[in-house]
Image (cartoon, rainbow, N blue to C red):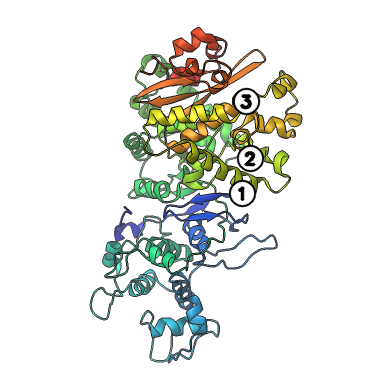
Amino acid sequence: MKRHWSSALLAGALALTLLAAPAQAIQTADSHGVQTVDSGAWFHEEDFPAALYPTAILYSYGLVNGAGTDQYGNISTGVDQPLTRQEAVTLLLRLLGLEEAAKSGQWDTPFTDLADWAAPYVGCAYAKGMAAGTSATTFSGEAPITMEQFLTLMLRALGYSDANGEFSWQDPYALAEEVGLLCPLFSGKGFLRGDAMFICYEALDARPKGRDTTLLEELTANGAIQKRGVPMLDPSTRLKADYETLPQQLDYLKEEFGVNHVTIDFSDYPSFTAFTDQLWDYCQERNYWAPWPEDIYTFSEKPEELYWELAAKMEGFWALNERFEEENTQNYPTLAPTDVKNHAWYQAQADYLADKLPRDLWEQRMELKDVSDTLLRAWSGTDLRLYARSGALNSDDWHIPLEYYTCTALSGEGREGSYMLQAMDELTALYDQLVDEDMTDYQKVKAIYEGVMARTDYNNTVFNKYQGNSDWDAMLSDPEFVLSQTWLGVVKGADVVCGGYSQAVSSLLDLAGIPNFVVTSYSGDMGHAWNKVLLDGNWYNLDATWGDGGNSSQFFLRSDQAFLRDGHEDYVWDGTSEDALLFPARQDYR
């Protein structure tokens, strides 16, 4: 259920910037559950404000248009610009799917000051009782619209009447909150196009007065929703923190748009400890990994001289670090004791740095991910859960999976995204073929394990050709090597090596919603990969590669000790499989 946001949240001055990643063709379900396909274009904005998130969804539905394109076809939205009254009416009619009706109709209005292009839109809105003039003969179309005026237009469009006393156009916030048109991310810089985009986005989940269906459901039923492609947006943003609303801002970004990384500027906070206390409590409540105060300045774009000056100021901090590492043994569940840093240590860092860091360095990057999810996604070579959640091919800002980069060898330059989209459809089809949603989790894991082994064989040719080979470019340009290393090989019917087996198992388990990760490790020149999976509260090993070469039950849901006994000791105990040790499999599945 969508949150309704208090009008008190409008007071915070928020400056938001959206970072953009290269566009990639991919199909995704947004938070409304409607499938969209990446168009291959970018939203072209100087600072990429956060308002591009709702704008991207509205654009993909065909409910809003850009403000033009550059020479490369990238779309300008103007979300950081004011919105005029006639532009606001046009935006509203497009949102309601009434643009063609407005352009084709004959409208009689008393207004003498309308631009030619705006006349049909204003005429349609006036005839339907949505818009009124500023006098008997003027509409003041070039004047900027206020938030109160825009909310009034939207409420009228949803069937509410200020003329009948259901709300006041001077103060529509109470009804707007009740209907669900407000959010915690308005710009606080007057009323901009981006603010209007947030209101339009929220309106999609609103129910017109007296009806049980949402506006989006009605638009979909009427054929007004298009799937014209949405520019690729990175699941990362930047915001100026507001002490009163930061938790709501972060939750909204995460829940509505799948944002996973936020760089937060805390320079307006009342004190340094106010920042660290709030951030610690927020992360603890949601089981997020709290970023450490010591890392603040390393993310700031400051001259190198200032970096070293600050490092010199912090000499005493490192001694403090050593002492706390020795004295504290409390830790997050599943983390090794060497990684221990508890709240006391966190606060000690904050206290030490409070007088050392200039206020303009109070900026920190944090992940809006569960601690265990952060760990598992970092170790897994597959990203299916994130594909569905945010439409991004990257599990975080630092890593894009091998299979995307290597699609050039499989499909040709410029067709990587299309190839990935087709392969993901094939992977989903394979999942539907193997898994019945009425199965238990155990039955799903077994069906996936056996299904992967039945669909492929071990690729001895690739193993013999590339064993010990360090020519990475040559390997990535060889289609057979590419297919053998990733889940792509399994869905395409190719023979694979351990990387392909383990990635396919992990990808299908991701689709099933069963926690898992790929174990990767090396012994000399010999590398190997298999899976760990969480069932009934316990972790277990399964190795489809070795299972396909002999007794499959011998390598299915077994303990660490069983895998040691049966030949995995060369991989587990060589110091490079710390991930496997942090999630021990203490027993075979019973």
Reading the image, the residue beneath label 2 is 404
Reading the image, the residue beneath label 3 is 457
Q: Examine the rendering and report whether any part of residue 299 can be seen.
A: yes
Relative to 243, 498 lies left or right: right
Q: Quadrant of the C terminus?
A: top left
3D distance between C-alphas at marks 1 and 2: 10 Å
Residue 229 image offset from top left, x and y in percent: 57, 58
Q: Amino acid at mark 1?
A: Gln
Q: Amino acid at mark 3?
A: Asp
Pick whichever, 244 or 506, lies toward us: 506
Do the numbered discs 1 and 2 sit on residues whose CB atoms are within 8 Å?
A: yes
Reading the image, the residue beneath label 1 is 24
- Please give the label number shown on residue 165: none
Q: Secondary structure at mark 1?
A: loop
Residue 45, picture quadrant: bottom right
Q: Secondary structure at mark 2?
A: helix
Q: Earlier in the sequence, mark 3 or mark 2?
A: 2
Q: Residue at x 42, y 49 (%)?
A: 253
Q: Residue at x 75, y 34 (%)?
A: 477
Residue 445 image offset from top left, x and y in percent: 44, 29
Pick whichever, 362 or 491, lies toward us: 491
Do the numbered discs 3 and 2 sit on residues whose CB atoms are within 8 Å?
A: no
Q: Earlier in the sequence, mark 1 or mark 2?
A: 1
Q: Secondary structure at mark 3?
A: loop
Residue 362 image offset from top left, x and y in percent: 45, 41
Q: Give the vertical position of 586 relative to 35 (above or below).
A: above
